[in-house]
């Protein structure tokens, strides 16, 4: 992953989706809501040495791969690791595996893409 960025590198709009518990008669299922989501311009990079793997989830084969999103560091983006990142260009959703800071100017979201989200 590159370590120096400029504003022109931020070419994707990413929506960070909050988890929302829905109530039903049996259990509280997790839903992801676009309402009140945080939108940010980001640099997207599928890691070169990404490990694409397949797992069995509920008797279904699920493929996953690693992706990094980089946004400007700001206090208005308070995203937690329990949220999802959604790339509006491709429509793909990502789980956030970790968040780090780069040079006190950029925030790096280490994500995992799964085809069952």
Image (spheres, grey):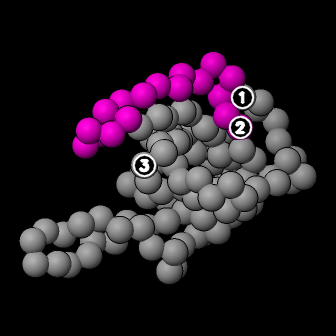
Q: Earlier in the sequence, mark 3 or mark 2?
A: 2
Circle 2 residue: 45
The residue closer to the viewer here, 11 or 77, is 11
User: Which of label 1 and label 2 is nearer to you?
Assistant: 2
Callout 2: SS: strand
* Residue 64 placement, left or right of 5: left
Q: Which residue is at a point 61% across and 38% down the rendered structure image? A: 67
Callout 1: SS: loop
Residue 99 horizontal/vertical position (percent): 52, 44
Query: What whole-number distance in Å separates the C-alpha atoms at marks 1 and 3?
Result: 26 Å
Mark 2 burial class by Cα count in 10 Å: few <14, some 14-19, many 20+:
some
For the magenta stretch, what is the residue range?
Answer: 45-61
Q: Which residue is at a point 42% across and 49% down the rendered structure image? A: 116
Circle 3 residue: 116
Mark 1 burial class by Cα count in 10 Å: few <14, some 14-19, many 20+:
few
Q: Earlier in the sequence, mark 1 or mark 3?
A: 1
Residue 51 horizontal/vertical position (percent): 54, 22
Q: Which mark is residue 1?
A: 1
* Label 1–label 2 contact, CB within 8 A: yes
């Amino acid at each position: 992953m590159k370590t120096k960025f400029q504003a022109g590198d931020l070419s994707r709009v990413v929506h960070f989706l909050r988890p929302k518990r829905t109530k039903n008669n049996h259990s509280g299922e997790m839903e992801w809501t676009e309402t009140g989501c945080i939108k940010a311009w980001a640099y997207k990079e599928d890691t070169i040495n990404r490990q694409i793997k397949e797992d069995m989830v509920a008797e279904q084969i699920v493929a996953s791969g690693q992706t990094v999103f980089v946004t400007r560091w700001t206090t208005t983006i308070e995203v937690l690791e329990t949220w999802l990142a959604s790339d509006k260009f491709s429509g793909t959703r990502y789980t956030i595996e970790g968040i780090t800071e780069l040079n006190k100017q950029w925030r790096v979201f280490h994500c995992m893409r799964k085809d069952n989200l």
